[in-house]
Image (spheres, grey):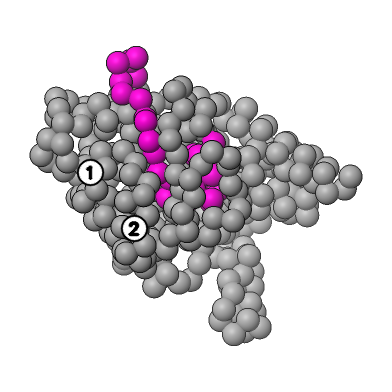
Amino acid sequence: MSSSVPKIKSALVIGGCGSLGHYTVKQLLKLEPVPRVSVFDIQTGHNRVVGVEYYDVDITDKNQISSALNKARPEVIFHTASPPAGLSDLPLYMRVNVEGTRNLVGCARKLDVKAFVYTSSASVVHDSVSDMTEGDDSLPLLYLPDQTEIYSHSKAVADQLVLDANSTTPGGMLTTCIRPSMIFGEGDATTKALVERAAEGKYKWQIGNGKNLCDWTFNENVIHAQFLAAEALLNAHGQMLASEDMLVAGQGFIITNDEHISFWKFARLIGSAAGYPTREEDVRSMPKVVGLMMAAIAEWVTWIISFGRQKSGLNRVGIKFSCMTRTFSIDKAKRVLGYKPKVSLQEAIKRSGESFHRLESKKKA
């Protein structure tokens, strides 16, 4: 991006007390000049940052959104809020991810917000079952029943909703979707789960031959892509000068660290960085069918003892995911956004794992 690109003067982070949202807030405060930053979250008592305006807002309540937006008055909205993936609750996903997003874009358009950047997911173009090699943004969004994961279904519906809200008239709100593949990072819940498995010695077993490649995205790189998108939308606001093949407004962009890696190698590297190494010579492989059988039993037992309220940590979705190939091409993001990862995969793994190593050390001190 050139120095002529408009800077972000005021920003609202939806879900700004969550993992990615909190990190987005911290990165916004590193920009020069520092923008005015506000946060909407259902509970704002944790992950607070000095100098930021916080509003307790349930995005499924349009009146709460409208009232708080009138006070915050941002020119850019970064929407990062979502229930975690992996739940068995389609109504929750549809209520928060879809209706909540619908409420946000509807209220934002009425209050002259210039740019709306939605954190979607690369899973919106993947059925969560088949192997995928070099998938890109030309693929169609997938919905139930073609999409087998309810979380990804809801993200796809919200993704299209945001793109459809893009204004085609000068001065209207411009929108875009950033679609990261498997976010990880310092203090991130997914990274924590990987470290906990490494601490328990679980990476001495892998499902399949361990050669299946996948794409991960360091949270700082996701935020870098969000900022590039926001600046491009601000630059285009009221101008509409970009050629069709260079449009950011109304477009989705898959984002990764641009380095394919074996799923199991990545997990073991995270564990090693956190102080829980797994020696390669100790690793044993388990056939996929055996892993699926074990997961099915674990799911059944968990369902029985929790009366259907909990989901097993060992589950068939996780087993399938751990042994599938799922890689993406980010050529569109490179060409149109000018995106390239700010932090390499090696450095990102080191920083992410070490963040939990330090946390464990503090607990023992």
**Please, which residue is most extreme toward the left here?**
169
Farthest residue to the top: give it. Answer: 3
Crowdedness near tag 2: few (<14), some (14–19) or many (≥20) residues, C-alpha within 10 Å: few
Which quadrant would residue 246 be assigned to in this image?
A: top left
Task: Give the residue pinned by disc 1.
Answer: 112
Q: Is residue 120 visible?
A: no
Task: State which mark lies toward you, 2 or 1.
Answer: 2
Give the amino acid at mark 1. Answer: Asp
Q: Is residue 272 above or below residue 59?
A: above
Judging depth in this view, the residue of 351 and 349 nearest the camera is 351
The answer to whether residue 162 is above or below residue 303 is: above
- In the image, is 275 to the left or to the right of 249? right
Q: CA distance from mark 2 to mark 1?
A: 14 Å
Part of the protein shown in magenta: 1-26
Relative image position of residue 94 (x, y in whole percent): 36, 67
Please, what secondary structure does the residue beneath circle 2 have? Answer: helix
Q: Is residue 87 left or right of residue 74?
A: right
At 39% from the left and 39% from the top, the residue drawn is 11
Image quarter (top left, top right, bottom left or bottom right) of the N terminus: top left
Q: Residue at x 70, y 39 (%)?
A: 355
Q: Is residue 4 magenta?
A: yes
- Name the spot of residue 161 as percent of width and height, x first: 25, 54
**Figure check: 214 above or below 84:** above
Residue 170 shown left or right of residue 191 in the figure: left
State if disc 1 and disc 2 touch (CB < 8 Å). Answer: no
Verify whether residue 241 appears in magenta: no
Which numbered marker is on residue 67?
2
- Type of residue at label 2? Ser
- Can residue 7 be spotted in the picture? yes
